[in-house]
Amino acid sequence: QKEVEQDPGPLSVPEGAIVSLNCTYSNSAFQYFMWYRQYSRKGPELLMYTYSSGNKEDGRFTAQVDKSSKYISLFIRDSQPSDSATYLCATEGDAGKSTFGDGTTLTVKP
Amino acid sequence: GAVVSQHPSWVICKSGTSVKIECRSLDFQATTMFWYRQFPKQSLMLMATSNEGSKATYEQGVEKDKFLINHASLTLSTLTVTSAHPEDSSFYICSALPGIEGYTFGSGTRLTVV
């Protein structure tokens, strides 16, 4: 079993839709949770960083963590074509090592 | 914001040759950097942790003699793929921690071995 499982996608939505991206993790020791956006042939870009259960909002993006169920989500409101990318969830464990989900590729159609 | 610069962005080399990839933290010091490998449509797999002034720590299954890591200063880590073969073709990405929240990644290096 992978330590971080991510809904595989791909996901295709019309412009303006609300997008929900989801991951589960298995290690209750994980304290920090991240969402990255990766465009093709580029390195990942940090979108959200959270370390507690609850919601964290940044513009159109909301990260949600539920430690009791080991579930993390990223919501994108009013999705735009420029949001089309692969989204990676990640957790941070020992010695700062990050464990990544496999990514969900999102396409937002104009 | 914090920037990690990675060079080259892409490289093609002949089988049997060595390739060096550089990762620099431009506006912060990084005592630790991480090197990842990513195959098409797959996630990032941690290869090794690069520690300034000491030996790198390699993940299980990663050949330390093939993937040489040098972290000679607080702003520079290098990954050298020695005696490269076509199966080493991949996307290599470094990351560093500029603060306390989240890692900054380099833009990646696409290595093609022919």
Image: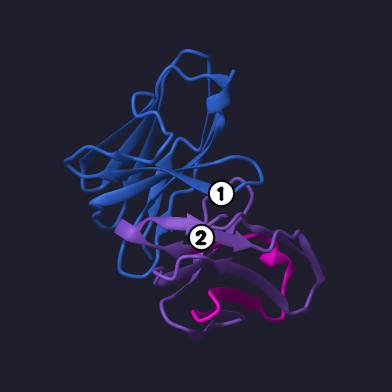
Chain colours: A purple, B blue
- The range drawn in magenta is A65-90
- Extreme-front residue of the structure: A1
Q: Which residue is mark 2?
A: A45
| Quadrant in the rendering for residue A30 | bottom left
- Tell how many labels: 2
Is there CB contact under 8 Å for labels 1 and 2? Answer: yes
The residue that appears at 66% across and 77% down in the rendered structure is A76
Residue A50 is a magenta residue: no
Give the image location of residue A84, x and y in percent: 70, 62
Q: Is residue B62 above or below residue A52?
A: above
Q: Which residue is mark 1?
A: A42
Instruction: Identify the amino acid type marked 2.
Output: Glu
Taking depth in this image into account, of A75 and A33 the one nearest to the observer is A33
Give the image location of residue A45, x and y in percent: 51, 60
The residue that appears at 48% across and 68% down in the rendered structure is A34
Give the image location of residue A81, x and y in percent: 74, 66
The residue that appears at 41% across and 19% down in the rendered structure is B18
Q: Chain of mark 1?
A: A
**Disc 2 element:** strand
| Quadrant in the rendering for residue A18 | bottom right
Give the image location of residue B37, x and y in percent: 50, 41
